[in-house]
Amino acid sequence: MAASAELSTSATDGLPAPLPSSVMWLPASALNCYEGDATHRDWLLTPGLLTQRIRAAATDQFSMRLLNERRCGDEFVREIDMSCDKTVWLFAHTRIPAETAKRHDWLTRIGERTLGEAIAEQTSLERAPFRFAQAYPEAWLVERALKHAGLAPRPIWVRHSAFRIEAAPFDLYEVFMPSIGSR
């Protein structure tokens, strides 16, 4: 079973950057050059609601857990995992600047739904093209996701989505576990 992913910071502390500034972000068109596993690449490139695809693949073994949803420094942070038969397939980390959270407080009250399900209802939402990075376990977010999933340190793919709702920004980082889609 996955270990707890409790934040180790108080509500007033800031968090480190999810990934170091030196990470090489790639556009979707470059993934063929860097990810040789066609199945894993297909999961990374999921265009629609990733939650729906994970639910469909996991069928009755699907679970989603809200791990954290609270203010940390000048951001509101939310973390969930999505699993199949207690194996974590995806670890998601959302950062919402305080000003965005103030203007759109529904983002701080998503609760037991996924972010994808909550934003699917929004008509004024803009999403920049996905960016992808193969990050190493020394990166704060990768270390955290691997520890939560009970996996040994290894490089892992992260997909970043930059959103704007009525010009107010927020970010989603999705950590794709090696077992995603495997039953």
Image (tube, helix red, strand yellow):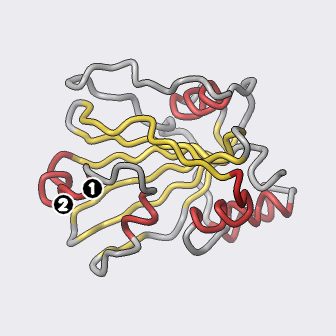
- Which is nearer the eye, 32 or 93? 93
Give the left or right position of residue 180, taking residue 132 as reference.
right
Mark 1 residue element: helix
The amino acid on which the numbered mark 2 sits, given as a three-letter code, is His
- The reply to whether callout 2 and callout 1 are in contact (CB within 8 Å) is yes
Q: CA distance from mark 2 to mark 1?
A: 6 Å
Residue 173 in the image: state x and y as whole percent: 49, 49
Residue 14 in the image: state x and y as whole percent: 28, 27
- Residue shown at 65% from the left, 69% from the top: 46
- Which is nearer the eye, 108 or 160? 108
Residue corresponding to mark 2: 104
Residue corresponding to mark 1: 107
Mark 2 residue element: loop
- The picture quadrant where one finds residue 153 is top right
Residue 117's tag is: none
- Residue shown at 33% from the left, 20% from the top: 9
Which quadrant: the N terminus? top right
Residue 161 higher or lower than 149, as above or below: below
Give the left or right position of residue 46, taking residue 93 as reference.
right
